[in-house]
Amino acid sequence: MKGQIVSVNISDAKGESKTPVQGKVSFKTGWGIVGDVHAGTPDRDVTLLPCEALGGVPFGGYGENIDTAGIDILDLPKGTVLTIGQRATDQRVTSGSGSGGEQVRIQITQHGKICPSRCSIYYKLGNCIMQEKGVFAKVLEGGEIMAGDEITVETTPTSGQTVAEGGPLASDPFGQRATFGVRATSGADDNIAWILENCKRIALFGASPKADRPSHRIMRFLLDKGYEVIPIRSGVKEILNQRCYPSVREVAGDIDLVLIFRRSEEVLPIIEEAMGRGVKAVWMQEGIISPEAFAQATQGGLRAVMDRCIYKELMAGGG
């Protein structure tokens, strides 16, 4: 599958539209585009959008780094490796000259995102499609590219070459970010798939009544997807029309999953409470890392996930 790079865009301020670059742009391995404000964001070195989704908005208008054409990047699964390099021959899309053969390799790490608040792009354009249509990627091999270069699917997670088999994905820095086996292991992926399929009643620690907080937005997303979400928060009567409880011990009935939006140092007592309550699984949201709590949960027979975003996992699985 081949397409074309229509525009490469950078900016020096977050929350703003990016400006198309005329000429070559340098990509740095594990970092992103040299000179772009979003470079160095973990697992989100660069962002892509299909130009067909822009709806007349100028290239870079939604804050994306790369605009593509002729390739269905929205349908490519997480883990897909893309090669950018040789000049595309279709002059109907762009008259750019291409970079002359140097290649850059990137790997898709995420589809869509949760925005903690609305940025100037939203207020300027009335919407921000990055939440639904943004594709985020890690730079596996750096180099220089420019508008007019080809973008080609090198391999996908289902193409027969996987991390375990030593294929192209084996060098993925995203996969190497594993902590205590949580990332880049089939066991972790099995736990995620099992939880999303079987855990329908969720107790959410750290649920916020504020609509701009990630826990609130993800709670709304889960409710919309048909999950029953019970907010655990003292001092608040209800969130999103769901009664709040100060402790999971006070919730009647079985609980399938404890989803945690709390500081890493506050997780261990929550895990102990969950184990005492007889839950099936615990999930520490992305950015929450407690190896001690993770080990205690798994040793206690719970399915456990750490430092992963349940919204991203549901979106990646077509949820």
Image (cartoon, rainbow, N blue to C red):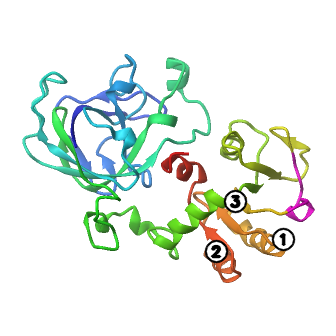
Depth-wise, is mark 2 or mark 1 nearer the camera?
Answer: 1
Q: Which residue is mark 1?
A: 277
Is 246 magenta? The answer is yes
Q: Secondary structure at mark 3?
A: loop
In what element is the residue under mark 1?
helix
Q: Where is residue 311 drawn, in percent x and y?
A: 59, 48
* Foreground residue among 294 and 133: 133
Quadrant placement of the N terminus: top left
Q: Which residues are magenta?
A: 243-253
Which one is in front, 265 or 52?
Answer: 52
Q: Residue at x 61, y 40 (%)?
A: 116
Q: Is residue 26 above or below residue 159?
A: above
Q: Which residue is situated farthest in the bottom direction here?
A: 299
Three-letter amino acid code at the position of disc 2: Phe
Q: Is 89 situated left or right of 254 in this image?
A: left
Q: Decide: few, some or many residues near mark 1? Use Cα within 10 Å; few <14, some 14-19, many ≥20.
A: some
Write down the residue under mark 3.
Answer: 199
**Mark whose residue sits in front, 3 or 2:** 3
Magenta stretch: helix, strand or loop mostly? loop
Quote the CA–CA distance across marks 3 and 2: 18 Å
Q: Separation of disc 2 and disc 1 at Cα?
A: 17 Å
The secondary structure type at the circle numbered 2 is helix
Work out whether mark 2 precedes mark 1 in sequence or the reverse, and give the earlier one.
1
Q: Is residue 309 above or below residue 296?
A: above
The amino acid on which the numbered mark 1 sits, given as a three-letter code, is Arg
Q: What's the residue at 57%, 54% (across, down)?
A: 309
Q: Assess whether mark 2 and mark 3 are in contact (beta carbons under 8 angstroms).
A: no
Q: Which residue is the site of mark 2?
A: 294
Q: Residues within 10 Å of mark 3 (few under 14, many from 20)?
A: some
- Between residues 16 and 5, which one lies in front from this camera angle? 5
